Structure formats: structure tokens, C-alpha cells
Image (spheres, rainbow, N blue to C red):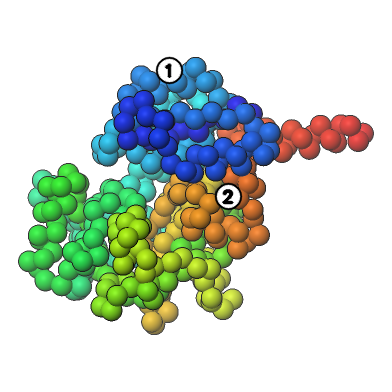
Amino acid sequence: MKITLLGYVEEEGSKDVDVVFEQVTQALKSKGHECSVLGVHADLQKMVSGLRRKSPDLVFNLLEDFAGGMQGGLIAATAVLDLLRIPYTGGSPGEIFLQEDKGLSKKLLAFDEILYPHYATFAQDADFETAGRLRMPLFVKPLRNDASIGIDGRKSLVRSTTDLMERVLSIHKDLKDAALVEEYIEGREFYVGVLGNREPRAFPPIEMDFAGLPEGSPRIMDARAKFDVDTPEYQGTRAVVADVDDTLKARLQKVALDAYHALRVRDYGRIDLRLTESGEIYVIEVNANCYLEKESEFAMAAGAAGIEYDDLINTIVDLACERTREPSPRRRTTRKAAKVAT
């Protein structure tokens, strides 16, 4: 098939894309696909004309942003693919909306009786919403941003009302977003990758090892821990395949699958969990269209399940084809082989 990888660039016309583009391209080419890359920033007309010019059979959607953090930008950009009637991998605008509005996603988890931290939201217009009784310490983060944007382990974990309101106002001012305030769940942090639609499969859990953090540092994956390579937070954390017994593994996977279904995730996603000392499993976040770089937690989990990276990427393509009722490359090959055999 002709597959176009669609992703975000920091400046209009830039060719500087994330390393994941080359990795996904090579994986797709290994199965015979013809690949192209389309980087977009904020020019919708360029996005539409680029897609029409490339005329792909399928878009591999790697967009993580559109229009420089504009609220709803990613949702709108994905909706363009629907309007152009181009099949694509991953979540639709609806699923992405559910992922981005963390308050709404918690309401859906509550409906399915899936455990999550008690929370409150502080909108910029002074609107306030709460669910459950909040106890200090509290964790404050943007309601709609992802990739740990706006999360600072030294400031996001608050222990007083004064610190809480200062952090909420900072998110309002700096990120132009509502603030999500959650009861902080102390415990082990796990990531469970899930692959599939009608019969999704949960991968072995990945655990975030915080043992290398300085004494007294909060066990949080903030922006420094994810992106600033020279910081103690980055150097003191690492993802490992979780060393858990079969019972706990099955419990983590079940909660992940329940959350995956509750938020209508398509094709693939990663569920972030916390396990308390008393054995309770909390859903912290549901990540549709999660990061697919070879060293990512999702790819690591797939590897632990015996799925090589090239096969993982091409399985995502197959799942998107099946969803859109297009014959997948593997099915076409199977039919042709069967015909020759006959």
C-alpha cells in the first residue's frame, strides 16, 4: 500500500521530524509498503494539499500536536482525515477528545467502576468541579496537555492550599489550560500496552524504576525525567519489564483492558497505572496513539510479548485496515497464496 506518515513539525515547512518517523518507515518498507512523510505545523491548506498530492491508501497518524498546542488542534486535524475519507491508524477525533479531557475520561472510568484518583478541575473562567474527597498531598497538572507538559515534580506535588492555588494559576497563565488536581497515589508505577480492537491484547507490564532519583524526590515522571538528559530526574529513572507474579500481572492487564474499552481506544494504546501498598490499582492516564519509538515503553512491552518492532508497526496497519473494511496486506497475500495452491 501507499502509506503516508503524518506528523507535527515545530515550524512550517520544516523537515526536522522525530526519530520515530524513520523507524516506522523502515518497519513498513520491510513488508513492502511504499512510504512518504508529511510534516505539518498549523497550515491546514498545506496539510490537505499534501495529502491529496500524495494520495495515500492509508495515513499512519503520528500527530502529537497541531498549531503549536492550540486546544482541540489535534482533534480538528484528525477530523480532516475523516472529511477527506482517508483511512488512518489510531484514534478518531472522538477518542482523542476523550483522552485529552482528563476530567471527562475519569467520568467514563467511574461509570465502569474502574478505580482512579479523586480529583477536581479548575477552569480558567473560575468554574470548579470536584469528584470525591481530596486529601493532601495533591498532584496538579494541565487538564488537556500530555507528554508531561506543565508537570514539574518540584512544584506539581503540593501539600498546602496556598501551593495548590499558585500551581493552578500558573497553569492557567502559562498554558492557557484548565488545571486538573488529583489525589496523589503513592506506589509503584506501571505501563500496560494494549493492541487490538475486537479482541485487544494486553502486553506484559512495564514498571518505571525510580530508584536512581535523589533522596526525597517525588516518584513522578515530569518533563525533566522525560526530556532533559542532563538532569538527575532523567538519569535516575528507567523503564524495565516488571518483575511481578502471574496474579498481579493478570490484575494489571485486566484493569488496563477495562480502561482501554471504557475510553474506546482504537488499534493501540498505553494505560498508566499505580499500585498501592494495599494492592489497589488506580488508572492514572489512558494514552491513545501512544509514542511508538523503538525504545518506548509500548515497544518494550510488545517485545516482552514476543512481537518484534516491524511486526508491531505492521499489525497496527492491519488493524486500521480491518476497521475500515479495507483488505489488509496480509489478507491479500493469504488469498493469493490460497488461489495458487488451489
Residue found at the very far front of the displayed protein = 230
Q: Quadrant of the C terminus?
A: top right
Image coords of residue 109 (percent x, y): 38, 59
Whether residue 58 sits left or right of residue 220 in the image: it is right
Label 1 SS: helix
Label 2 SS: loop
Q: Quadrant of residue 318?
A: top right
Note whether residue 171 is visible.
yes
Residue occupying image coordinates x 28% and y 79%: 215
Image coords of residue 8 (percent x, y): 38, 35
Callout 2, which amino acid?
A: Gly
Q: Quadrant of the N terminus?
A: top right
Image coords of residue 5 (percent x, y): 50, 33
Q: Which residue is mark 2?
A: 196
Residue 300 vs 329, above or below: the answer is: below
Callout 1, which amino acid?
A: Ser
Labels 2 & 1 near each other (Cβ < 8 A): no
